Image: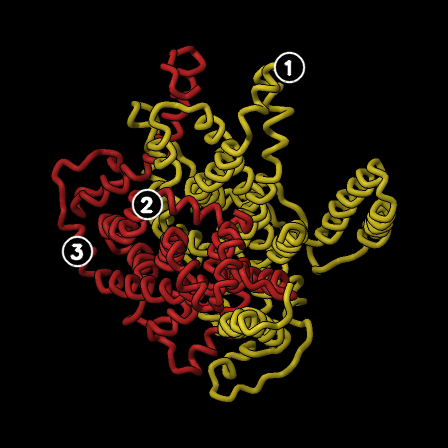
Amino acid sequence: MTARAERLTPGRIGMYLILLLAALFFLVPVYLLFATALKSPDAINLATSWHWPAQLNWGSFRDAWDKIGGNLGNSLFLAVVSTLFAAVLGSLNGYALSKWKFRGANTLFALMLFGMFIPYQAVLIPLFQFIKSLGLYGSIWGLILAHMVYGLPITTLIFRNFYADVPDALVEAATIDGAGFWQIYQQVIFPISIPGFVVVIIWEFTQVWNEFLFAATLTNTNSQPVTYALSQLAGGQAVSWNLPMAGAILAALPTLLVYILLGRYFVRGLLAGSVKG
Amino acid sequence: MKGLSKDRLWAIIVLLPSIILLGIFVYGFIGRTVYVSLTDWGNDPAQAMALHPVIKFVGLDNYKELFSGFLQSRFRQELVSTIFFTVFFILGCLGAGLGLALILDRNPKGEGLWRTIFLFPMSLSFIVTGTIWRWMLQPQGGLNMAPTVLGGQPATFGWMSSTDAIWKFDWNKLPLLTASVVGLVLAWVAFGAFRRAERTRAVVAAICAALLLGWALFVGPNLHLLAAPELHGFNLALIGIIIAAVWQMSGYTMALYLAGLRGIPEELREAAQVDGATQTQMYRSVIFPLLAPISLSAMIILGHISLKIFDLVYAMSGPDNTFTSVPALNMYLTSFRQNQFAMGAAIGTILLILVAFVIVPYLSSQFRTQEGHA
């Protein structure tokens, strides 16, 4: 069906036209983003906001970097550490829940999953108090703890579904050979988990990198991740618009690159979020 | 199923840290929030940040204040806003996502590239999206100036600075409206169950519907939450935020629908064609029914995202624009700017209840069907 050479009927032309219009809707903001980021402050004028800058001002990126570079570092550290913790725990949880089913395992899993849907506003005040009482308020570690815990449901979910596709016969064969819980994980499950880890790490990294509410509540100036810094940069009325635009590009770049390079895995994480996957 | 072997014990031990952490961070904290929402913590500013604040138990006073207090009309507008936002956001995402998926399913050239373009906003933070669209929707620039590129006149809609609202209704009529709508839905459910001969379900739904509608007819009209009428409606300033949210999330529904379309066996389509079905007939009676469960999942996922949305509003119109504000944003400001923790906790609890209405039936139905082949 698909390999057949394409004949351009009016219907096909209409289809491409719609695709083009839709692409325009998605890409026009990107054009405006770059056009504004590359202008110098005095060239930014609402009336000419659609014009491509006459002179490219790459300095915007340097200035934006000066303002939020440290926060980008915070975000990177935060996202890498909490993603790794959540991924490793999620893999073990998924293995335990899918291959060593005990009574009530599904109910337990549903109760765990609920944690990924709650509005975090409903836990924010006790979370704040808890982090504060641990002495972690304002430190990046408090934020890492929060992200790790609230990341557990989705990482467990993705791994559980991933391992559900591994034939039980493999595990049974290993049991007959005398292998226990940990040997089976090491020799059978973990070696085939790489795609699962890729999906989970990409998804969780993106989530943590993009998160805002915890970032705004649990950190102070030294430990704020880039989303909060960007919101402050863009919220200030006095600042010229090329700065927040350049900042937005910097803040978007890591997750965008991951998406473009590893899109297939990103989409799998996306679909896994609808529980059954 | 074997008994409690050593390995099964290991499985439980491995799960234990996660169970304890989630137990505390989800269920413990929710319990604590509900408790705080029943106190007066922070209603007296002097006590809010005290080391050992004097906290009194006040029952449902905070909720009463939110729904009928003179000072909290902002919250009531936000509640109305969040419902309108959710409805239009879901409609927008489902419509755009389904349209794009149907087109991509016809194998256009460069399909991968189109898909990448439609989906890339999903990888961005709501803060980044908000920053971009805040600039796009400046009243004297961006989108309003777009017609001038083609030589037209600039548009004049104020986007986020608009203060107009449509579809206004009196807050006093809210219980009445809610009871009527829920009553009618239940009546419809009862009718459906009756036709499928599910006796118990039909009877229960019919009784509930009758009770609610009866209440709406006889008691509701005499009930007044507020002393004076208070109008709330759909704030036009939300339109811009809805567009930005659809821009970000419609790729998600597209991916869901596309996965669903790819899962429909080719034989099914061929069989329909052999039976002489036209394209339209095939979509209407073969493909769309198969996509219905996907629509339901998508509505639930998008619905809970939309009820929680907060960062996008914060980034697009700042924390202080009451015309675009939503309860999730109000909760943050009330708790962490004004230090009115009890009131913030009450808003958080209301949000949780709203989300739970959407999520709990979904999760329990997912697991009821899974239990079979587990």
Mark 1 secondary-structure assignment: loop
Foreground of the two, B44 or A210: A210
Q: Where B2 sits versus B53, above or below?
A: above
Label placed on residue A262: 2
Across and down, in percent, residue B91 comes to: 55, 38
**Circle 2 residues within 10 Å: few <14, some 14–19, many ≥20:** some
* Mark pair 3, 2: CA separation: 30 Å
User: Residue, x 39% and y 16% (percent of image)?
Assistant: A4
- In the rendered structure, are the residues bearing label 1 and label 3 in contact, judged by CB atoms less than 8 Å apart? no
Identify the residue shown where x is 50% and y is 83%: B46
Instruction: Pinpoint residue A162: horizontal percent, then vertical percent.
Output: 47, 52
Q: Residue A63: give its label.
A: 3
Q: Which chain is yellow?
A: B
Q: Taking B240 as reference, is B207 left or right?
A: right
Q: Quadrant of the N terminus of chain B?
A: bottom right
Instruction: Give amino acid for label 3.
Output: Asp
